[in-house]
Image (cartoon, rainbow, N blue to C red):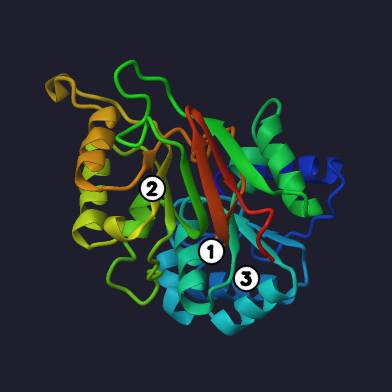
Amino acid sequence: MRDKAAFKRGLSRLEALGYQVEVDIDARAVHTRFAGDDQTRLAAIHRAAASGADVALITRGAYGFTRLLADIDYKKVGAAIASGTKFVGISDFTAFQNAVLAKTESITWAGPALITDFGVEGVPDDIMEACFDDLMTGHGEGAGWRLPYRKKDVENQFADQEIYIEDAVLWGGNLAVLVGLIGTPYMPRIEGGILFLEDVGEHPYRIERMLTQLLHAGILAKQKAIVLGQFTEYRLAPHDKGFSFQSVVDWVRSKVNIPVLTNLPFGHVPTKVVLPVGAKVSLSVEKRDALLYWGHSHTH
């Protein structure tokens, strides 16, 4: 836990919103750069699975979940999800979410973290809070957003068409973490899905390199659509000479014959929606209006 003040603010805000909050006994543990050694963190995951809580929420992301994947009791996690516990998180949590999907086909939720979202100085983002409340109350049905305007090409080669994709598995998360799962038993083998991706602190050329790995692994071409969220906190260099994130998007679109949409409000940013990883969703696009929705599906 790097920011104890933010941790306390996050707890206070959740309680002020009317939630009853229980902090795991090892939430404050430290072992080198990790929140406890591997066994400590594994035990915390299994306690969360046994807790009967409505939501098990991560405090923060960073790195460390991939070390644990071989030793997680996926039957316990799957049983907890079947009983109603919703595991929620972002960033490094992508490893856990996709491993759970690969091993149990259970749904987890890409959403906020305690410290970075509820524990911010000032006022937490109202859209983030509203989406989290929808998850808690069972009212969440979808996420809509506006595609960016471009004079020559509103979105991609599908820009002049209405797009409608029905009952496709939504999966993905943090790009760097997901790419680290390729070739392992913890990478979901999804065909005909909708792959959503985000990242932070990665230069566009590194984003392109990771997307290239997904491309060469045959993963991108097997999807019905790719939805890119927010890619933030990088700095371009003078020798980029016009090479930008948009250059990467255009390159990916030239390599796959499926819609590649951008600007999904999800990532390492204050305004983020909550997404059901592993649920069957539908995607519709009309001009610049995009909508992912799952209210018609079973997402428990």
Q: Which mark is residue 44?
A: 3
Q: Quadrant of residue 238?
A: top left
First in sequence: mark 2 or mark 1?
2
Mark 1 surroundings: few (<14), some (14-19) or many (≥20) residues within 10 A: many
Residue type pointed to by label 2: Ile
Residue linked to disc 2: 226
The structure residue drawn at horizontal position 75% and vertical position 47%, both measured from the top left corner, is: 134
Q: Quadrant of residue 78?
A: bottom right
Residue 299 higher or lower than 103, as above or below: above
The structure residue drawn at horizontal position 66% and vertical position 29%, both measured from the top left corner, is: 121
First in sequence: mark 1 or mark 3?
3
Q: Label 2 to label 1, Cα distance in Å? A: 15 Å
Q: Label 2 to label 3, Cα distance in Å? A: 33 Å
* Residue 133 x %, y %: 76, 45
Q: Nearer the viewer, mark 2 or mark 3?
A: 2
The structure residue drawn at horizontal position 30% and vertical position 55%, both measured from the top left corner, is: 220
